[in-house]
Amino acid sequence: MRKLTLQFAFIFITAINTDAQYEIGYLSGIGITDILEKSKSGNINDTYSEGLGYTIGSFINLTLLKEHLYFKSSIGFSEKGAYYPVYGSGGNIVGKRRENVYYLESPFQLQFRFFPIFKIQTGIYNAFRLNMKINEFGGYDDSYVNYDSRYDIGYTAGIIFEYKEYILEATYGKSFRSIGRVGYWNDDLQKIVKSDETRFYNQTLFFTFGYKIFKNKDKIKD
């Protein structure tokens, strides 16, 4: 968590102490969140089903090439996760349970303006999971996944609509490092068989609204 905060603070302090053109604002929104399952052999399972999540945070945009290329750094809070089935005594599905995964997240993205009011952006994000409480049985509360890492690292891509100080974004994100794994117990070998492990990855599509609360463009012109 400290690393994420320091990264954002460093970029912010660097910007305000130079003549670089920059903008500062906030973003908030909702979206579709899911948890993907993939085995080492490449098989993709669909135990989980999509749910809704939300995100809120602040950002700073630095101009790298006037009117065309920008660097964006942000820090915020996001709710990810999905629904997983609840099985009855007969093995049939009797319902679904929401698995919430909360993160402090910091994406770093490059933006390219291809039209006066439109940009595309792509980059990476790193996130620190906030809710990882181990229960009395050694597992994680409210969790189907055996989470073995507090960190989620992945890539993002999206499209941006800007009008004056207003921003609308649609951004897709996916883990490229697993957020957890489940092994299988082999009764003959009496151990977990890692070759059959299933690994889990976050996948999100967020739609956010933003507002630029400060920009130093006028200062540069003067």
Image: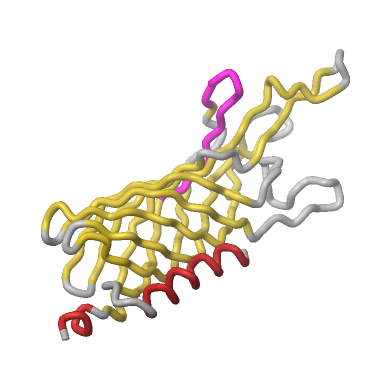
Q: Quadrant of residue 48?
A: top right
Query: Is residue 34 in view?
Result: no
Query: Relative to 148, is 130 above or below?
Result: below
- Residue 145 left/right relative to 82: right
Residue at point 66%, 51% (across, down): 150
In the rendered image, residue 175 lying in the magenta stretch gets the answer no
Query: Is residue 203 in view?
Result: yes
Q: On the rendered image, what quadrant is the N terminus found in?
A: bottom right
- Residue 72 left/right relative to 141: left
Prevailing secondary structure of the magenta residues: strand
Residue at point 71%, 28% (across, down): 90
Q: On the rendered image, what quadrant is the C terminus found in?
A: bottom left
Residue at point 66%, 58% (across, down): 131
In the rendered image, residue 85, in percent from the top left (x then y), is placed at 60, 38
Residue at point 43%, 64% (across, down): 74
In the rendered image, residue 43 lying in the magenta stretch gets the answer yes
In the rendered image, residue 164, in percent from the top left (x then y), is placed at 17, 73
In the rendered image, residue 77, in percent from the top left (x then y), is placed at 51, 64
Please report the bounds of the magenta region as a residue range: 32-44
Question: Which of the pair 1/93 is nearer the observer?
Answer: 1
Query: Relative to 9, is 156 above or below?
Result: above
Question: Which of the pair 192/51 is nearer the observer?
Answer: 192
